[in-house]
Image (spheres, rainbow, N blue to C red):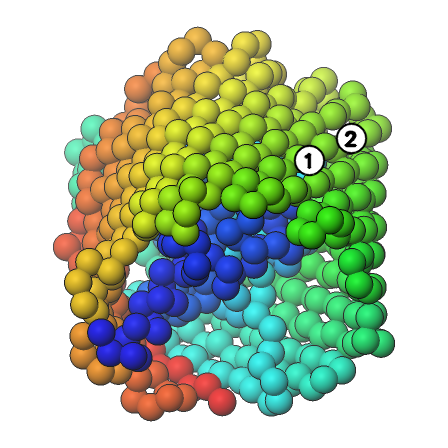
Amino acid sequence: MKKTNLSITTALLLATNLYSSQDLGTINISSATKSEQSIKDTTSNVEVITSYELEEKHIATVSEALNSLSGISITSNGGLGQLDSLFIRGVDSKRVLILIDGIRYNEPAGLSGAPLAQLMVSDIEKIEIVKGAQSGIWGADASGGVINIISKKPKEGLSGDVLLEGGSFNTKKITTTLGAKKDNYFIKLNANKISTDGFSAFEAKEGTADYGKRGDELGFEKDGYENTTYSVQGGVNITSNDTLKMLYKNIDAQYDYDSSTADDSTKVSYINHYFKNIDYTHKKDDYSVNLKASQSKFNRTQDTFNAQSLVNEFAIQSKISYRKEDTLLVGLSKQNFEDIVNNRKYQTDALFVSNLNKFDKFIFSQALRYDNNNMFDEKVTGKLGLKYNFNQELYISSNYGTAYNAPTLGNLSYTSTLKPESTISYDVSVGYSGLKVTYFENKIEDMINYTFVPSFHYINEDGTSTLKGFEIDYKKDIMQDILLSINYTNLNAKDKDGKDLARRAKEDFKFGIDYYGVDKLHIGLNGQYVGERYDKANKQGAQTGKYTIANFVANYDIKKDLKVYTKVDNITDKYYQTVDGYATTPRAYYAGIKYSF
């Protein structure tokens, strides 16, 4: 293989944790233990999507990026910017903690977890995904896993880039970055704007006469979308041991949306969210101390409904290295959650400790957390992880965790008597030379759900829901200049009565083929098969599975600092719905150019 192509393929191999041990040392993660460590030393079931993969595939949204991984699926109420629902191993968005550079992105006044659909792919260094119960590290909202989206840092000296893209539905995108980095400081500005006329979010439901026809065929109004996201980050090395960093990020968006029963030309949603963080770290020899203050503020208006909420978090933690490669982390945190409109709030004080021990080929991790919430009972959660590396290619690992998921302030505005639900999860993985097989199981007790009897409100369901299955991942050079990546998930998700949970696919198969055999050119084909899936519980409602879609991308490097690309989504123009009555994209074409300096 040519030297250039080898470096490209290796970079793509580093996009997940499906590679050999000698490559693992090049990626560090922080989401598994709240402390940076090499991914090869992590017992947790972790996947990482790198900036290289995002840029090579020209992925538009974080939802699209996550949907390429095993065990993860996304359903959507229409096109770009419409409500997305995330499932990790069948556990839905409300039970998954999403972070932006460690800042909470879950909306306290919301009912569906983090507003995932508003996260565009811009200025992202990597996305870390930790599967399974993580409350022992992160507290509430992490019973299904943690996703941490980490921004790029500027290169040495002065650097920047500009990207322009256009395509179907009158879609326009512009992204620009400017950064400077010297020995004692760095600063970076990023701005991303995307707009599209879109297509009708509503489509005819299964079983009706017009099912199978798209909105433009039926004369429905197009539901457009606009998103302007910008961020400012900077840092200064006060001394050789002391660093101060800050981040500010704003997401300003609006989109037209439809109800679940008809096309509507009047409904508009407005979003203005911002996130702030200041971070001080003192490092010396074998220990470090970190102090962090962050704020997430959400402002969402849908038609005549307005929700405003706030999270303030203060944390201090200390990391101590002892023996040769063992580490101990101890920390305190205080979280204040507020529903501003309904004047409802609660707070959580927490103490957490995690420890990592390495004994030659054996790695053992432990975590314990105590949460004291002024509205609910005290909670103690934990996590244990084991990993044994037989050699550089073969390993076995296992994780066990307990977690809890607190009702959001939005849930409590409907039902004030709700209590937290409890989760136990475990997984076992075997990995060998690009192949990984994982068995997983999640048990959720007192699951929070909604009912319309006698009117809409939330309840804690008596009993235990069980979500279990297995994942198979494979990523490898199969021929010179060709990289193959495939993954398969088999999921069995049952409620307390043994009935199938809604909108979880029984089977999910994803594939990607990347070819680098022509100098300066990359051609990729990726896609997904979704198996049996029903829109309602107990296999009721519309069948929203049993389809295959494929996408195409081509990149060409005109020169080192100038690249052009084109991509085609849904190349076969497949008609399908992920939520009954809501549209998905028809065949769509995009092209762009990027200049870097």
Circle 1 residue: 367
**364, 319: nearer the viewer:** 364
The residue at the point 40 percent across, 88 percent down is 561
**396, 69: nearer the viewer:** 396
The residue at the point 38 percent across, 54 percent down is 19
Q: Can you say whether 157 is above or below 75 in the image?
A: below
The residue at the point 52 percent across, 20 percent down is 443
Task: Tell me: 393 left or right of 239.
Answer: left
Q: Are marks 1 and 2 in contact (CB under 8 Å)?
A: no
Q: Label 2 is placed on what type of residue? A: Tyr
Circle 2 residue: 370
Q: Residue 447: where, in percent of width, then height?
A: 56, 20
The residue at the point 51 percent across, 56 percent down is 127
**81, 440: nearer the viewer:** 440
Task: Tell me: 547 left or right of 243.
Answer: left
Q: Residue 410: where, in percent of width, then height?
A: 66, 34
Question: Residue lying furthest left in this view?
Answer: 572
Residue 21 position by quadrant: bottom left
